[in-house]
Every structure is written in C-alpha cells, then in structure tokens.
Amino acid sequence: MSESTRLDGETAIVTGANAGIGAESATQLAAAGAEVVLAARREDRLEAVAADIRSAGGTAMVAPTDVTDEQAVAALVETTVEKFGSVDIVVNNAGVGRGDSVAEMETEAYRQMMDVNVDGVFFLTRAALPHLIESEGNLIYIGSFAGQYPRPSNPVYAATKWWVRGFAKSVMAQVGEEGLAVSIINPSEVRTEFGSEDGQPFQERFEPGSVSEPAEVAEAVCYAASQDHSTAAEIDLFRRDKFAAFEKKR
Ligand SMILES: NC(=O)c1ccc[n+]([C@@H]2O[C@H](COP(=O)([O-])OP(=O)(O)OC[C@H]3O[C@@H](n4cnc5c(N)ncnc54)[C@H](OP(=O)(O)O)[C@@H]3O)[C@@H](O)[C@H]2O)c1
C-alpha cells in the first residue's frame, strides 16, 4: 500500500492540531490519505496547518474547539460525522504542562492541566466512542514518559499523564471486543512549543538532534492509526540518552 493511500476513506480528528505533535500528526495522516479534522483553540493557526495540508493535495477541515468545553467537543464529533460520514481515527493530543513545584503551584495552573489533559481527554473519548466502535477504528492517546515514571520536576503534569495511560488501557479493555483499537504513544522530550506558558519552549530548550522531533511522534501516530486488526497498544519513543540521564544524576 502506498503512503498516500493507506488511510484512504478514513476520517481523523486530531486535537491540538495547530502546533507541535498535533500539527505534524494531522499533516502525516492527511498525507496517508485520511480526511483530517483539526481541533484546537487558535483558529488562525489551524487555518495555516489546513492550508499546508490542502496545498499538498490533502483534505482538512478546521474546527476551532476548546477541549475543556464538553458541548464544544460533542459538537466537534457531530460536525465531523455530518461532514465526512464517520469517525475512524481520534488522536487525543491536546495537552499542557505548567509549573513545577507542588508547594508553589498556583491553583489556576493545576486546574488548567486537569481540565485539558484529563477532562478534555474524557470528553472526546466519550463523544467519539460510539462512532469509533461503529467504524472499528483507532483511538490514540498521546501519553508521556512522565506518565510512566515519577517526574520530580512536575508531579501534577506527570499525574495527568498517568491518568491518560490508565484510562486508555481500561478503555482498551472495555471496548476491545467490539473491534476498536486503542493506542498510547509515550514520547520523552519533543522539540515543540510545549512548556512555553511558563518558561522556555522545548524547541528552544533542546538543540536539534538532542531529543525527539514532532515528526517522529507523528510517524508513531500514523503507525498506530494504520492498524486494521491488531492494536499498537503502547509505543515508547524516547530520546536515546533518557535512561543514562538517571544514572548521571546519582
Ligand atoms: N513536547 C514534549 O516534550 C512532550 C513529551 C511528551 C508528551 N507530550 C504531549 O504531547 C501533546 C502535544 O504537545 P506538544 O509538545 O505538541 O505541545 P504544543 O506544541 O504546546 O501544542 C499543544 C497543543 O494543544 C492545544 N491546546 C492547549 N489547550 C487546549 C485546549 N483547551 N483545547 C484545545 N486544544 C488545546 C494547543 O492549541 P491552542 O493553544 O490553540 O488551543 C496546541 O495545539 C501533549 O499532550 C503533551 O503533553 C509532549
């Protein structure tokens, strides 16, 4: 199957699709033939990603959505079904990392991480599940290394990603018999705008080649989305020196 046709006829919703991992995932899913629905809050940036996809011959619809708004998320799914007839792939990607010290964390930063990384993931999963079961589709979550190991630099962010992985695995157990695939992709550091709300974005903090690029995570998303019968249950995509860094700290 060629790269441009392996997802032909499939419709994908990607949250956080106007930046970083989400923009790359939407672009690569479209290049593989999927019709993509781009969701995030900043509409001008969604339009820019959609324009690039269309100029490369792909199909993209812009759907400005705040994932913390459950009615907006339900409308995102319904609009997608009305426009394209099905939902075959969902990428729960929108996420934020704020603050660091628990003792000093503002409630507003805590609340935002819980609202986006936890509630937003629940709202989209709930709204999309009936359609994904009907299409026997692929439900994908962007977890994190921080959701697999303790993270001294930000326990609250880590906890939201542990929740994502626990939820995803249990959804997998609940709906697997119905033919739906559920995948979790766990990157370590990726060079995106992540971290910019409180400090230096990762794309500036890390030199090219020292950690992962968003396109590499997007390739894992496309791999998971391309499974017809099996489930790519969990993919860990780590910088090569990730475990060596633990040792160096001793
Ligand atoms: N970068 C890393 O090192 C890394 C590592 C592991 C896991 N991750 C995870 O990967 C995912 C994507 O992160 P990224 O690195 O690509 O970050 P990013 O470049 O900062 O992008 C974050 C995306 O989330 C969207 N978003 C934030 N709040 C939203 C809301 N309320 N409603 C809808 N969309 C919202 C943003 O768009 P708007 O602001 O326009 O809404 C943006 O598109 C996140 O779940 C993150 O936790 C990242």
Image (spheres, helix red, strand yellow):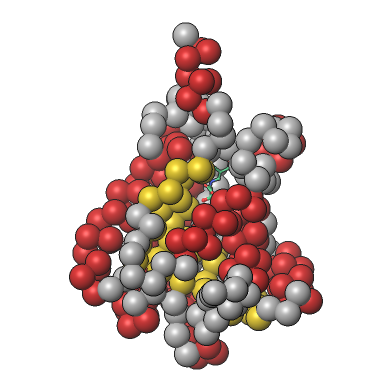
Q: Nearer the viewer, residue 142 or 158?
A: 142
Residue at the spot 48% in from the left edge and 31% down from the top edge: 154
Q: Quadrant of residue 45?
A: bottom right
Q: Image height check: is 11 above or below 121?
A: below
Q: Quadrant of residue 171?
A: bottom left
Point out residue 138 in the picture as x, y percentages from the top left corner. Answer: 40, 69
Point out residue 16 in the picture as x, y percentages from the top left corner. Answer: 58, 60
Q: Quadrant of residue 139?
A: bottom left
Point out residue 140 in the picture as x, y percentages from the top left corner. Answer: 43, 61
Residue at the spot 40% in from the left edge and 53% down from the top edge: 184
Residue at the spot 63% in from the left edge and 65% down from the top edge: 28
Q: Is residue 129 left or right of residue 140?
A: left
Point out residue 18 in the picture as x, y percentages from the top left corner. Answer: 67, 62
Q: Image height check: is 134 above or below 144?
A: below
Q: Is residue 158 left or right of residue 106?
A: left
Quadrant that contains the N terminus: bottom right
Q: Is residue 146 visible?
A: yes
Question: Outermost residue, front direction?
Answer: 1
Residue at the spot 45% in from the left edge and 38% down from the top edge: 145
Q: Image height check: is 67 above or below 204?
A: below
Q: Image height check: is 203 above or below 94?
A: above
Q: Is residue 230 left or right of residue 245?
A: left
Question: Outermost residue, top direction?
Answer: 250
Q: Is residue 64 visible?
A: no
